[in-house]
Amino acid sequence: MSTLIDVRDLKKSYLLGDIVVNALQGVTLAIERGTFVAVMGESGSGKSTLLNLLGCLDRPTSGRYLLDGIPVETMDRDQLAEIRNQKIGFIFQNFNLLPRMDALEDVELPLLYKDSETPNGDELGQRALADVGLAGRELNFPAQRSGGQQQRVAIARALINKPEILLADEPTGALDSHNGAEIMNIFQRLNDSQGITIVMVTHSDEIAAYAGRIIGFRDGLIVSDKKVTKPAIPPAEAVAVHIAAGVSP
Ligand code: ADP
Ligand code: MG
C-alpha cells in the first residue's frame, strides 16, 4: 500500500475577533491508500478543521500536506478547486441536497463545475445512484425521501467524479441506527470493492467500529490511533440496500 494522505505538523489557527483559536496544534498523520479511517473526539477538538484541510477546502496556518505525493498546502484557490474536483468527494451530516432538484439532477451537479462537458452525464448519474442502491429513484425530490435515502443521494453525488477519497463529516449524525448501518454498509463496499479511501468523522463508537482504523482527537492533537482488527459487519437488514450494477458485493 502507498501513502495517499501525508500530513506533517499541521497547524490551523482561526482569528475570532482578537482571540486566536488554535484548532489544530500540530497534527502528523499518514493514511494509506484504500483504508477506511474514523476520526473521533469531543466537539471542538478540531475534527472538522482537519477534514476541511484534507479536503483542500482550506489551507493550514503551517505544516505540510502531501496529497498523493503532491504538496497542496501552498496551492492557490483555483489549484485547490481543481484537486478537489479530481480526487475528493464530500459528505456532510445534513446531506446538503437542493430541495428543487430531483435525485439525478442533484447527483450530476458536480459535473457542471468541470471544464469540459460530460457527454454521458445521465449515464454516470444513474450508475452512481445504482451504486448506493437507488436505481430507479432518479426522479424523486428530497422531501419525498427518508433521511437515509437523502444521504445515499448525497453519497452518489460525491461519487460522480470518481474520487479517490471520500471525506465524511458525521455522515450518520442525523440518522437512526438502522439508516446509519446502511450508510456504513455502503462505505465498506466502496472501500472494499472500489478501493476508495475514506476518512469519516463520527461521535459514535458503534459507527467508528465499521472502520479499519480509529484516530482519537483532543484539543487539536491526535491522542490515540488504533487499528481495528475486525471491523463491524452491518446487520443483514441493513445490507438489503441492494447495491446494484457497478459494485460487486
Ligand atoms: P470539531 O469538528 O471537532 O467539533 P472544529 O474543527 O469544528 O471541531 O473546531 C475546532 C475549534 O476551532 C473550535 O474551537 C471552533 O470553535 C474553532 N473554529 C472552527 N472553525 C472556525 C472558524 N471558521 N472560525 C473561528 N473558529 C473556528
Ligand atoms: Mg465538526
Image (cartoon, rainbow, N blue to C red):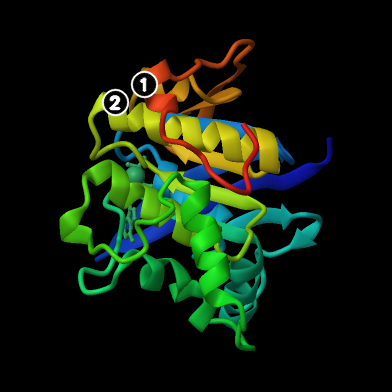
The one nearer the camera, 200 or 161, is: 161
Residue at the farthest left position: 143
Residue placed at 70% from the left, 47% from the top? 5
Disc 1 secondary structure class: helix
Q: Where is residue 199 in the image (x, y as percent from the top left)?
A: 54, 40
Q: Where is residue 95 in the image (x, y as percent from the top left)?
A: 31, 54
The one nearer the camera, 58 or 55, is: 55
Asked if ligand 2 lies within 8 A of label 1, the reply is no
**In the image, which disc is placed on residue 237?**
1
Q: Position of residue 201 (x, y in %)?
A: 43, 37
Residue 100 to residue 226: above or below: below
Disc 2 secondary structure class: helix
- Tally of numbered discs: 2
Residue at the farthest top position: 230
Determine the image quadrant of residue 119: bottom right
**In the image, which disc is placed on residue 178?**
2
Q: Are marks 2 and 1 in contact (CB under 8 Å)?
A: yes
Residue at the farthest front position: 136
The one nearer the camera, 183 or 21, is: 183
Residue placed at 46% from the left, 36% from the top? 242
| Quarter holding ligand 2 | top left
